[in-house]
Image (spheres, grey):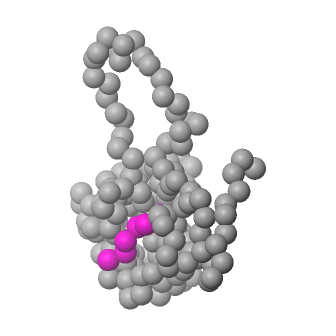
């Protein structure tokens, strides 16, 4: 079964919880309401004919444009004092890539969550392999996976300030490793 057919099945069961399908001509990725992630994941795993028994990858992402990609600029509308529409509010998100060994098909979906309160339901009860993936997304992006059994940092020290893969992250001047204080070099 191809990804568009699977997305159609999800749409049929969950209706408006499937918000869109990105990149339908390349590799379709269903966009799901964040509150429905665990329900959709359970449906994808437990529905005969789908049987997504393998979580290949779970990745956090940040939709904020990098400053060098979109430098501050003045437009004629801004100069005239007219309001300029902001195309999309930057969010954090999680992408899920699934595979079914019995059915031999793949599917990908993602969910966006607000940067200031990034919560998404955990899928560790559905795919235990999600445990460390969700901890990594929490550690590096600050995404909180509600219902995770042990949500804590996995790569950085517990006292690390912030989440370094957010595009607005300001690097620390120094950090501690045990009793040692390490200065971070600038300009390399």
Q: Nearer the viewer, residue 166 or 60?
A: 166
Q: Residue at x 52, y 53 (%)?
A: 170
Residue that sits furthest to the right in the current view: 188
List x then y, in percent, for residue 55. Answer: 52, 77
Note whether 161 is above or below 75 in the view shown: below
Q: Decide whether residue 144 is among the magenta residues.
A: yes
List x then y, in percent, for residue 94. Answer: 44, 64
Which range of residues does the magenta coloring cover? 141-146
Q: Quadrant of residue 40?
A: bottom left
Note whether 133 is above or below 32 in the view shown: below
Q: How many numbered discs, if any?
A: 0
- Report whether 118 appears left or right of 26: left
Q: Quadrant of residue 74?
A: top left
- Report whether 170 appears left or right of 151: right
Q: Residue at x 32, y 57 (%)?
A: 116
Answer whether residue 128 is visible to the viewer in this image: yes
- Report whether 28 appears left or right of 188: left
Q: Quadrant of residue 81?
A: top left
Q: Nearer the viewer, residue 3 or 73?
A: 73
Answer whether residue 130 is visible to the viewer in this image: no
Q: Residue at x 28, y 69 (%)?
A: 36
Q: Residue at x 63, y 82 (%)?
A: 179
Q: Nearer the viewer, residue 42 or 118?
A: 118
List x then y, in percent, for residue 33. Answer: 30, 61
List x then y, in percent, for residue 106. Answer: 54, 69
Q: Decide whether residue 67 is among the magenta residues.
A: no
Q: Nearer the viewer, residue 25 or 144?
A: 144
């Amino acid at each position: 079964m191809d990804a568009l057919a699977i997305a159609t099945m999800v749409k049929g069961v969950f209706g408006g919880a499937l918000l869109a399908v990105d990149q339908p001509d390349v590799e379709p990725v269903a966009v799901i309401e964040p509150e429905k992630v665990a329900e959709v994941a359970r449906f994808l795993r437990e529905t005969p004919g789908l049987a997504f028994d393998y979580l290949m990858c779970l990745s956090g992402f940040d939709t904020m444009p990098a400053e060098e990609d979109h430098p501050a600029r003045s437009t004629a509308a801004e100069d005239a004092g007219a309001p300029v529409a902001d195309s999309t509010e930057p969010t954090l998100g999680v992408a899920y890539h699934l595979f079914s060994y019995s059915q031999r098909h793949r599917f990908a979906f993602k969910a966006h969550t607000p940067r200031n309160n990034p919560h998404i339901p955990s899928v560790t009860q559905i795919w235990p392999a999600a445990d460390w993936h969700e901890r990594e997304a929490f550690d590096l992006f600050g995404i909180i996976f509600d219902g995770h059994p042990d949500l804590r940092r996995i790569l950085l020290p517990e006292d690390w300030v912030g989440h370094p893969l957010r595009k607005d992250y300001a690097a620390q001047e120094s950090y501690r490793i045990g009793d040692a204080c390490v200065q971070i070099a600038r300009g390399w």
